[in-house]
Protein backbone atom coordinates (compact mmCIF):
# COMPACT_ATOMS: atom_id res chain seq x y z
CA UNK A 1 0.00 0.00 0.00
CA UNK A 2 1.40 3.39 -1.00
CA UNK A 3 0.24 5.93 1.60
CA UNK A 4 1.36 8.08 4.52
CA UNK A 5 2.73 6.79 7.81
CA UNK A 6 -0.68 7.26 9.40
CA UNK A 7 -2.10 4.38 7.34
CA UNK A 8 0.72 1.92 8.13
CA UNK A 9 -1.16 0.05 10.92
CA UNK A 10 -4.33 -0.09 8.81
CA UNK A 11 -2.46 -1.54 5.82
CA UNK A 12 -1.45 -4.68 7.67
CA UNK A 13 -4.45 -5.14 9.97
CA UNK A 14 -7.31 -4.47 7.55
CA UNK A 15 -5.82 -5.31 4.17
CA UNK A 16 -2.88 -7.61 4.96
CA UNK A 17 -0.75 -5.42 2.68
CA UNK A 18 2.84 -4.26 2.93
CA UNK A 19 3.27 -0.50 3.40
CA UNK A 20 5.49 2.05 1.65
CA UNK A 21 5.34 5.63 2.95
CA UNK A 22 4.89 7.66 -0.22
CA UNK A 23 3.00 10.75 0.94
CA UNK A 24 3.00 13.32 3.73
CA UNK A 25 3.31 12.81 6.72
CA UNK A 26 6.18 10.32 6.88
CA UNK A 27 7.19 9.49 10.45
CA UNK A 28 9.09 6.23 9.92
CA UNK A 29 12.12 7.57 7.98
CA UNK A 30 14.21 10.70 7.68
CA UNK A 31 14.00 12.36 4.26
CA UNK A 32 16.39 15.11 3.22
CA UNK A 33 16.59 14.86 -0.58
CA UNK A 34 14.06 12.31 -1.78
CA UNK A 35 11.00 12.42 -4.04
CA UNK A 36 9.01 10.21 -6.38
CA UNK A 37 8.63 12.75 -9.22
CA UNK A 38 10.07 12.12 -12.68
CA UNK A 39 12.13 9.27 -14.04
CA UNK A 40 14.55 9.03 -11.11
CA UNK A 41 11.67 9.35 -8.68
CA UNK A 42 10.02 6.37 -10.34
CA UNK A 43 13.21 4.39 -9.95
CA UNK A 44 13.39 5.41 -6.28
CA UNK A 45 9.78 4.33 -5.73
CA UNK A 46 10.49 0.99 -7.43
CA UNK A 47 13.55 0.55 -5.22
CA UNK A 48 11.53 1.28 -2.06
CA UNK A 49 8.75 -1.14 -3.04
CA UNK A 50 11.20 -3.92 -3.88
CA UNK A 51 13.09 -3.38 -0.61
CA UNK A 52 9.83 -3.92 1.31
CA UNK A 53 9.30 -7.31 -0.41
CA UNK A 54 12.93 -8.48 -0.23
CA UNK A 55 13.68 -7.08 3.21
CA UNK A 56 17.13 -6.41 4.59
CA UNK A 57 19.79 -8.59 3.02
Image (tube, rainbow, N blue to C red):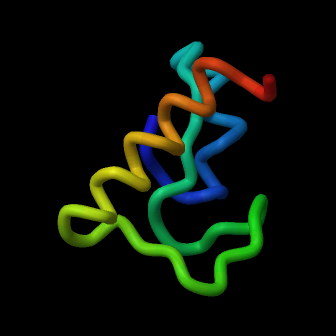
Residue furthest to the left in view is 38
Q: Which residue lies furthest to the top in this view?
A: 16
Side of 40 relative to 25 (left or right): left
Where residue 3 appears, as percent x and y from the top left, is 47, 51
Name the quadrant of the C terminus: top right
Q: Is residue 11 visible?
A: no
Number of labels in the image equals 0
Side of 16 relative to 38 (left or right) = right
Could you tell me residue 42's position as x and y percent? 28, 54
Q: Nearer the viewer, residue 53 or 26?
A: 53
Q: Which corner quadrant of the image does residue 17 belong to? A: top right
Q: Which of 10 and 35 is in front in this view?
A: 35
Which residue is painted at 75% across and 73% down in the image?
A: 30
Query: Which residue is at 42% across, 55% downward?
Result: 44
In terms of image quadrants, where is residue 41?
bottom left
Residue 43 place in picture, x, y as percent: 34, 51
Image-based side of 18 in relation to 27, left or right: left
From this view, report whether residue 28 is shown above or below residue 56: below
The residue under the point 58% across, 14% down is: 16
Q: In this view, does 20 lie above or below 30?
A: above
Residue 40, visible in the rendered structure: yes
Q: Nearer the viewer, residue 12 or 33?
A: 33
Judge left or right: residue 12 versus residue 22.
right
Relative to residue 50, is residue 46 depicted above or below? below
Residue drawn at 59 percent across, 20 percent down: 53
The image quadrant where one finds the N terminus is: top left
Amino acid sequence: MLSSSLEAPTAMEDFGALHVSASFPVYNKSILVHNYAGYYGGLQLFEDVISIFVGPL
